[in-house]
Amino acid sequence: MNAAEQWLDVPQLIQPAEMCNPNVDELSMMTYLSQFPSAKLKSGAPLRPKTNPARVRAFGPGLQPTGNSVGAPARFTVETFSAGRGDLEIVVINPNGVQETCEKVFNKDRNLTYSCHYTPTMEGQYTITIKFAGQDIPKSPFVVGVKGMAGDPSKVTASGPGLEKTGVIVKQKTHFEVHTKNAGMGVVDVVILDPHGHKDTTRPVVTKKSDDLWLVEYSAGGDGLYSVNVFFAGKSIPNSPFGVGVAPAVDPRKCYVTGRGVQANGIRVGDEAVFIVHTAGAGDGELKVDVVGPKSAQEKVRVKKIDATTYECVYEPKKTGEYVVNVTFGGGHIFKSPFMVEVAPAKPTKIRVYGPGLEEGVSHQPARFTVETNGQTGLLGFSIEGPSQAKINCDDNGDGSANVSYLPTEPGEYAIHVLCDEEDIQGSPWMATIRPATTDFDASKVTAKGPGIGKDVLVNEPVEFIIDTSKAGRAPLKVTVLDEDKKPVEVTVKDNKDGTFVCHYVPKKAVKHVVVATYGGVLIPHFPARVNVTDKLTDSDKVKVKVSGPAFDVPVKANQPTSFTLDCSKAGPGNVAIELTDANGRDVPVEITDLPNNAFRVSFTPTTVGPCTARVLFADQELPNSPLRFTVEPGDLLPGPGSGSGPGAGPVDASKVQVYGEGVKPTGVLASLPVSFTVDATKAGTGDLDVVVQDPDGNSIRPEVKKSGDGKYFVTYTPEGDGKYKIPVNYGGKPVPNSPFSVNAAPTGDATKVMFTDNAYKEAPVGKASVFKLDPSMAGEGRITCRVKNKADDNVDVDIIDNGDGTVDVVYTPQSPGPYDVDIKFGGKTIPNGKFTQQALTPDEFKRRQDEPDGLHDLIIPERVRKFGSAPPGAPGAPGTVEGGPFNPVEFCLPVGPIFSFVGAEITTPSKRKYRPKVVDKKDGTVAVHYSPTEVGLHYLDVTYNDIPIEGSPFQFYVDSVAPGRVTAYGPGLSHGVCGKTCEFTIVTKDAGSGGGLALAIEGPSKADMNCVDNGDGTCNVSYLPTAPGEYIIVIKFDDKDIVGSPFKARISPGSDLQTAHVAPDGSGQVALKIAETDLDSLTATIRYPSGKEEPCSLKRLDNGQLGIGFEPKEVGEHLVSVLKNGQHIPNSPFKIYVGEKEIGNAGRVRAYGKGLEGALANELNEFYVITKDAGYGGLSLSVEGPSKADIECNQDAEGLCRVRYKPTEPGDYVVNVKFADEHINGSPFKVKVGGQPAGQVSEKVLPARSAPDTVHVGSECELSLKIPSTNVKELQAMVISPSGASEPCDVTELGNNEYSVRFIPKEIGVHTVSIKHRGIHIPGSPFQFTVGPIVDGGAHKVRAHGPGLERGEVHAPCNFSIYTREAGPGSLSIAMEGPSKADVKFQDKKDGTCDVTYTCTEPGDYIITILFNDQNIPDSPFKVHVSPSSGGRKMTDLGELQEQGCQVNKPAAFTVDMTGTKGTLVARVVAPSGAEDEAVVQEIDKDHCSVRFVPRENGVHKVFVCLNGLPVAGSPFNVMVGRVDADPALVQASGEGLSKGCTGQVAKFLVKTAGAGSGALGVAVDGPSKVKLACHEVPEGYEFSYTPTAAGDYLISIKYGGNNHIPGSPFKAHIVGDSQEGKLWNEQSQVVVETVTKSTTTSVFSAAQLLHDADASKVRSEGSGLQKAYINKEATFTVDTSQAGHNMLLVGVMGPRIPCQEVSVRHVGGGRYTIIYRPEEVGNHLLVVKWGDKHIPGSPFHIVVV
């Protein structure tokens, strides 16, 4: 208050004592406080400083303890960027205490740096004090030792590529060397100025390699002229500064290849393999193309430069086998290089393929081509490879040919493979360039007509047709005519300038021709057109000439002009000739006029009354119905000169109207096809025309009437059905002659072949379009018609839409509720299931019906359309046959990655046919796979992402035909699913009778709650929720018998993006203890329960300031708390605490509610509440599982109300688990549907250039370069074991930056084992295999990857790992990272078989690192790494003290976590060397510190995972060494034929020798095409393993010892030959873990009976949570201490409600102590028996509840 009065002029209207009084006058207080908002600060007020000297950095050789000399400028830099404003003060004091001058220059750069230097004048110790804003910066004062006189920089030289004027590339590391021989003392310093004069953009790394040699490395960030300044002893060396020109980077990864010549399959011997290399944007570099054929033969390649960035490359393979195409640019492989091309033998084929879809197309528009088998038999198949999944549709033309279309959804190059018997035909694949989608044109709106595309034309006769593009937009038109040999025929295309084109050609051969027309590269509808060229007309062609007109439809009057029309549009090309004679045999003059569409009008004026005869010839051949006859009646005289008549002249006279044309001919018309007729009123005066068309049922059809302007009307109508139609025609209100006309409509096509392609439902919502999807492509000539009537019997408007792909949509919109009668016809006949009634419901009623259990019912079950195949007629699968009857369609919904174009799918049928199903991107990280089955039996679905099988692939599903009376099941839940998501399937029992009833059972890794809903229509929907990944067995029985396909196997995958966030608020009870001690770190505490079990507990400072403990009470009764200091009880210890029944946690009393449990939104906070009041003391555990990690916040108040907020980042189905006292509360787990928009994933892929190491020989030096973080050379030991077993130490040299060189000189040829240990423990990846001589067993399984960067990372901090590829042999390496941000990945090849990888991420989250060698995953790939937010260099925990104290088995270990500045919940778990996982106890010490405690049960390195708010803290997982590790994997040997070869159905064996290698966990895993039963039995020198493979292929056998360390040579590859008995298409793994004992090479035989006399089971002690409670499919643990019970054997067994527990592990950890781990497989009461010899230990048998 005094300060406010002094500096703000705020008078003290109230005294301080009054302010502290609870009864202070409120008005006085308010008056005093109201003065502050308007107060103004006086100058000179004591403000808090805005500077922070602690953030100033100083660095440089001038501050180093050594390296500076007299007379040489000592330079250093001070950086003040983060420190705020302040003055920099530097004081240099020499050894005599005298201040020397130090110059400083402000650089005015972005980091606010100062360049400083001083020149020492004498030897001794200098003190440099650096202050900022008057305060010392960190590490100030600096003590610098100056020794000797400065050297002579004139004797220093520098050389290397980093100083050359040219050759340095942007962002590529370069170097140079500085030689200081004979130059004296001094330090090399380098300053590099970029083209803008900045010196902070390029920082060199200077390394002293020897006394006379310095290595300088740098990487320029941009192009231009750089100035490299080299100093020695503070002065420039000769020629410094050096001018270095940095050129733009050459990035070969920006180059790409197109063309057939690099396709993996399809090239045949003798082909010209052509491909194009595109280098645009890759910089200036040299292109090199190298093709290596079989037996490493070099193939000749012709390279032609097309333009500045495009090259054409051609090679001609002469032999069969694998070819390798290497394409490099600027010295580096381009994208996807090298290419592996399999060349097959030349194989002529009769199959011909043609069409525009083989060359070009447009995205999102069908690209089409045609295949003609020409009598060649075999199974024809198609596959499309390209940037997107392309749906393939194949329509059989029934003549040995098929029209094939595919729908690309992304632009780019596509490879079209045409296969016969699963082998590319000659010329396949074809490469098509797909352009981006455009709205400039629509090829589906182009029409074509004319005789030139009719079925038959005459040879050597000119023909034409017209293409109309007026409604299709603007695009280039291309027309091609091919003869039978696919040779082009000359075509002329005339542009009429109105959007129409006249196409003209003359066929020269009487063979089949094909006309292909594309618009904008897209095939127009009804093309390609097949034209049969003949040398004469057939009778059927003659019949196709139609004759109509007034001369035959109305009476002909003498002396009055009349006419008739010849329609030759369907008869092909040809000339017309007419011979007309009257009743006297005299010729009647005729005039023939050409009309459009190959039609002709014949006009004449008869003068003689009586019969007339007309002979009609077409193409020089008389028509079958020729001669035609008609009668001329008496008429008026010809008009004299000056008289006239016409429209509008005189009164209306309906009798003078003439009606003629196809539409009124009594001979009939074709139903469903539009037909026309003409009304000629030119002589009838002016009047109104009225035309009505009535169908056979009396319904009126609206005709289309067009007036020509000369008194003629053209009337068009479409007869929807077959039967008699009446057409009354009135003019001026009176009927015209012969009205009403009677026309017979005949059916056409085959309506039975029209099929529904989607479901039609009984109900539809009012106001929304109801759509019926039909496929009439196989029904022949005809069209779809539809009539819809409402309840008032009124017609409803119907739209019929041609989709352009052979399918049709029938659309109508109900406007009011009620029934709507639908009648769909084709060619005049109702199609199958085409007549039905649909009920229109209000939108609310419709939604209610959707939500009902039985849902909406189908009216139509879609029938499958048989696809095209070229099998011989009558063969199984031949066109027109359907195997097994109709099938239910199959649909999968599978989680994949974010890039849809990476997804591939293939289905293998029981007959080994392969199909590519339809794959749909659901835009949520999942895809839907649709497939219509064609066969009965077991199918396999292979799904890949980026060419890597997804989790669970391949999936199995069984297909059975749908038949009445048979019980069948279908649906995705029978074959696959994702953990934590509901899986569904359907059972059909229609007409199967009651039988013995339906029985369902699901068995698997977790309990799967099942729900079955009877739909009331003979089907029932079944759903279940798996909560653990693995294989689930689904048994479906009817009448006590398995239905077809049962039992089904469903693979439940964890889902690569199914993540769990977990938080556990502290729900323990707090008890204050009378403790006088104040130092918590010196105290330890344990609690003993009433049952005798004892556990460590944490001491903490309670809210009231007292010390106490927090624990979760589980037993009623007296508890004893022992508090020790230096191993001794403190006063009053042990403390007694009584726990009553109400204090025990009861999950049944906990309640959860809130919107966050009903629905949620991605990327938003969703909230719910948990009430634990009156539920006792217990730990509250919360977890959210789903497609993304969900950050969880939890705030709990003193009243037991906990507010929970979580934030998922991806939409989808989530599971929220709420547990109290380790049990689910009521309603848990909760299923929550999360909507909203997803967050994207970013991927980065690196294809580094890797050099294969040179072959080493006996006597030459071998070297391994390794980066080993957090080590020093004194703590490393290296040993090499030769093939004969001799061992000797290796030389280990420190290279700097945590890099070490391990060298040895081999004396033998063969595989050596190099062991590298840090403090006696193998480093990750050790022991390493090192082959002296040629490498014979290479491959991806020999690659090792290790390093902290594969376990954890931190934002903006470089993360490192190493890859050891030496033993893998030659091959390509690929590294891909996928996660929340694009990772900056850098790769360094050490040229000795080791590679270093560094990556930097800008966003925290989970990242997937995939490492491929020769396109195969290396062991343990892909790796999942969590990148945590930046810690700013702050460590939350330090394990140094814990490691120094040493951790022992079965003794509590604890460390402290600093929570200062953070909020949230901390959880921890521990993973033992054997892989066993257990939770660690986390308890609060005070508000800023928590302790993590656990009890290790094994010796070896334990990984402690610590998470804050569900996310790992920086540095997690932490490695904690427990006890002493005896196991040494380098000393283990494996041998036997079973490691290298075997036969299916025969036992393969191998021996693992552990003698002399210490005791430890021995893990063996066999991964291969079939799951094997892996058996193990002990032998004197180790353990013998055996397995029996049932499928041929390569099996990988991994052998690890003492944790996660492979033994020498592991994994081994065994090649199994023989017939496959199971035929599975995926790899399965079998594994076994053996807890070994110490063995020596010799053993003694002794009598155990001598040692059993002192055994006493009553002295055995047991403890652990596994003695009270366990969880299904989770490991439960307890310990047994027999150290006081004498000698005997420990026997343990667990019996469940139905079966015994099959996995029980007993491990002797030393000193008579045992760790027992078991995994129960069913829920319920279990009996645990523990015996010491033949007697129960105290408490045995134990009763355990498994939940």
Image (cartoon, helix red, strand yellow):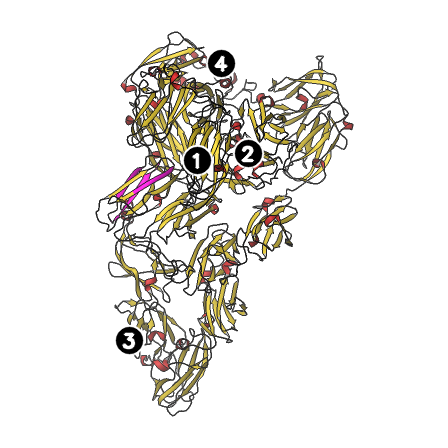
Q: Which type of secondary structure does the marked residue at label 4 adopt?
A: helix
User: Residue placed at 61% from the left, 55% from the top?
Assistant: 314
From the viewer's side, name the closer residue of 976 and 936: 936
Of labels 4 and 2, earlier in sequence is 4
Q: Position of residue 1377 (x, y in %)?
A: 51, 38
Q: Position of residue 1371 (x, y in %)?
A: 57, 42
Q: Disc 1 marks which residue?
A: 1586
Distance Cα–Cα, label 4 vs label 2: 54 Å
Distance Cα–Cα, label 3 vs label 4: 115 Å
Q: Is residue 214 visible?
A: yes
Distance Cα–Cα, label 4 vs label 1: 89 Å
Of labels 4 and 1, earlier in sequence is 4
Q: Disc 4 marks which residue?
A: 2
Q: Is residue 1388 above or below residue 339?
A: above
Q: Is residue 564 above or below residue 1700?
A: below
Q: Is residue 409 above or below residue 697?
A: above
Residue 1029 on the magenta segment: yes
From the viewer's side, name the closer residue of 611 and 1694: 1694
Q: Position of residue 1259 (x, y in %)?
A: 66, 32
- Does residue 630 appear left or right of residue 506 in this picture? left
Q: Which type of secondary structure does the marked residue at label 2 adopt?
A: strand
Of labels 3 and 1, earlier in sequence is 3
Q: Which residues are magenta?
A: 1008-1035
- Find residue 87 and report its image quarter: top right
Q: Disc 2 marks which residue?
A: 1400
Q: Disc 3 marks which residue?
A: 740
Image marks 3 and 1: residues in contact by CB distance under 8 Å: no
